Image (tube, rainbow, N blue to C red):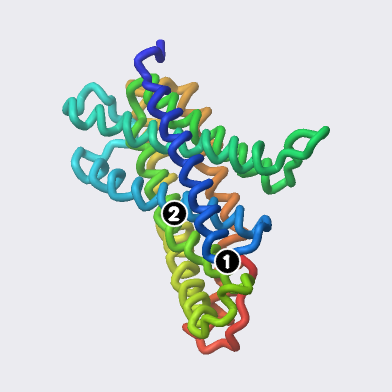
């Protein structure tokens, strides 16, 4: 069981993103960024932005091309759809493998100690592992893949603009960018747009999406997805939603204090 899942493609994607992250880092050095953790973090954000920007159009095409049933069986779909689904979930799994190794092993490694991780780091590693397990297990049982894709689409929808926010934030701290007069204004308005988008995704959309996915998997879709597996998926579904609550409050504060609501321009720390 599971031997028909192409893990080799995921490893190739992990290698691709690792190389991309290194290329971005050296490109930033070339343009005058300092050799600091901020530059390493920014290169990770640029790689993440590439991942989500490539993933989202594919997920949208897949979700609108077939009847929306979170627990649907894969074998009921056309061959091209099955191959595309494996490619998209394998692509995203590769990103999770890459980021777990590069971000939380290689770049946190301390001689004589190994990787030194903060509480937030462990949370992100846990998120990556659980997300990869969700996607891989849906491919293994050949059902529930639509639930994985719709949750991914909603979760990744704000990622490109979020990463732009982080890049702009770090750019303003670099000596080579401090002479760019329009950068603070761009940062402020991007932050406002991100906050609106994040609140829409996590407050107005996500609870209903996760609620419907949960209902379909646990009640209607028990013939397609084993009940024990659906139960295992539930903490993964709802954990991300509850984990986003602090970010939701921060985004609300950002909007209250930002130019869109005639505030003083102070912003919460995202």
Residue 70 location (% of width, % of height): 33, 36
Q: Quadrant of the N terminus?
A: top left
Q: Nearer the viewer, residue 238 or 259?
A: 259
Residue 35 location (% of width, % of height): 66, 57
> Secondary structure under badge 2?
helix
61 relative to 87 in the view: left or right: left
Q: Nearer the viewer, residue 112 or 59?
A: 112
Residue 252 location (% of width, % of height): 56, 71
Residue 81 location (% of width, % of height): 21, 32
Mark 1 neighbour class, 10 Å CA radius: few under 14, some 14 to 19, many 20 or more: few
188 relative to 250 in the view: left or right: left
Nearer the observer, disc 2 or disc 1? 1
List the residue tagged with mark 2: 49
Above or below 81: residue 22: below
**Residue displayed at 49% across by 32% down:** 132
Decide if residue 208 is in sight here: no
Q: Are marks 2 and 1 in contact (CB under 8 Å)?
A: no
List the residue tagged with mark 1: 32
The numbered mark, 2 or 1, whose residue comes first in the sequence reads 1
Above or below 179: residue 234: above
For marks 2 and 1, give the CA distance.
Answer: 21 Å
**Residue displayed at 61% across by 58% down:** 39
260 relative to 223 in the view: left or right: right
**Residue displayed at 43% across by 45% down:** 210
155 relative to 172 in the view: left or right: left
Q: Quadrant of the C terminus?
A: bottom right
Above or below 68: residue 175: below
For this orientation, the residue located farthest to the front is 30
> Secondary structure under badge 1?
loop
């Amino acid at each position: 069981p599971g031997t028909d899942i192409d893990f080799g493609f995921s490893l190739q994607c992990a290698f691709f993103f690792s190389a991309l992250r290194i290329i971005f880092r050296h490109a930033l050095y070339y343009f005058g960024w300092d050799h600091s953790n901020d530059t390493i973090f920014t290169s990770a954000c640029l790689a993440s932005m590439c991942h989500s920007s490539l993933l989202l159009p594919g997920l949208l095409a897949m979700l609108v091309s077939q009847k929306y049933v979170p627990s649907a069986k894969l074998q009921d779909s056309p061959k091209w759809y099955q191959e595309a689904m494996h490619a998209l979930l394998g692509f995203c799994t590769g990103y999770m493998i890459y980021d777990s190794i590069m971000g939380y092993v290689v770049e946190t490694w301390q001689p004589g100690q190994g990787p030194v991780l903060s509480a937030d780091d462990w949370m992100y590693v846990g998120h990556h592992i659980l997300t990869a397990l969700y996607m891989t297990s849906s491919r293994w049982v050949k059902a529930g893949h639509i639930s994985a894709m719709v949750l991914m689409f909603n979760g990744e929808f704000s990622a490109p603009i979020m990463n732009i926010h982080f890049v702009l934030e770090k750019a303003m701290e670099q000596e080579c960018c401090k002479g760019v007069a329009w950068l603070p204004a761009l940062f402020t308005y991007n932050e406002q747009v991100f906050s609106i988008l994040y609140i829409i995704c996590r407050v107005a959309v996500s609870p209903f999406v996760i609620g419907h996915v949960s209902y379909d998997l646990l009640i209607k879709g028990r013939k397609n997805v084993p009940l024990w597996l659906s139960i295992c998926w539930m903490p993964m579904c709802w954990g991300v939603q509850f984990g986003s609550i602090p970010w939701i409050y921060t985004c609300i504060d950002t909007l209250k204090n930002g130019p869109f609501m005639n505030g003083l321009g102070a912003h919460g720390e995202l």
